[in-house]
Image (cartoon, rainbow, N blue to C red):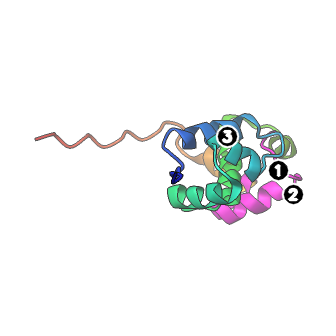
């Protein structure tokens, strides 16, 4: 009997995202995320890369950075607290990772957001359907 290979089905990726997001303050391992998807660690790694273009480590880091950015947008809390709340290993890891991902420190991002127009720009109208 031939075993059928399972990809990271569309319904599994949101489940993995939810798993990571709900455990940001904890250590999230690739093995844990693979178990949520119902895949082996090695197959999960290949499936995440194929589905997102990122390694599992990069994918988890991107979820942490998205959460940190959201917190920076929402409040003026202490950066060390935001680092802990989003699962960074130290308060120094957040600015380093944030800078590599977004090209600026969290402080600079926060300053930029404060000086930017607080009202979001309207999206362009949708093209008419023919």
At mark 2, the secondary structure is: loop
In the depicted structure, whether residue 53 falls above or below residue 124: below
Q: How many neighbours does mark 2 have within 10 angstroms: few (below 14), some (14-19), or many (20 or more)?
A: few
Q: Residue at x 87, y 57 (%)?
A: 92
**Magenta segment boundaries in residue numbering:** 85-106
Q: How many neighbours does mark 1 have within 10 angstroms: few (below 14), some (14-19), or many (20 or more)?
A: many
Q: Quick check: is 45 in the magenta stretch?
A: no
Label located before the other in sequence (2 or 3): 3
Question: For the view shown, which residue lies furthest in the right direction?
Answer: 90
Separation of residues labelled 1 and 2 (CA atoms): 9 Å
Q: Are marks 1 and 2 in contact (CB under 8 Å)?
A: no
Tell me residue 27's x, y (percent): 83, 46
- The reply, left or right, for residue 61 in relation to residue 9 is right
Tell me residue 25's x, y (percent): 82, 39
Q: Which mark is residue 92?
A: 2
Q: What residue is pinned by disc 1? A: 88
Separation of residues labelled 1 and 3 (CA atoms): 22 Å
Q: Residue at x 62, y 43 (%)?
A: 37
At mark 1, the secondary structure is: loop
In this orientation, which residue lies closer to the viewer: 107 or 126?
126
Q: Where, by quadrant of the figure, is residue 126 drawn?
A: top left
Q: Which mark is residue 36?
A: 3
């Amino acid at each position: 009997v031939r075993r059928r290979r399972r990809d990271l089905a569309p319904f599994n990726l949101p489940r993995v995202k939810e798993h990571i997001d709900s455990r940001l303050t904890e250590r999230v391992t690739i093995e844990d995320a693979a178990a949520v998807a119902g895949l082996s660690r090695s197959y999960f790694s290949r499936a995440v890369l194929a589905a997102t273009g990122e390694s599992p480590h990069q994918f988890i880091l991107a979820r942490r950075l998205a959460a940190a950015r959201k917190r920076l947008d929402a409040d003026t809390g202490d950066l060390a607290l935001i680092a802990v709340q989003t699962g960074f290993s130290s308060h120094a890891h957040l600015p380093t990772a944030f800078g590599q991902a977004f090209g600026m420190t969290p402080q600079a991002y926060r300053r930029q957001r404060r000086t930017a127009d607080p009202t979001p720009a309207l999206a362009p109208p949708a093209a008419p359907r023919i």
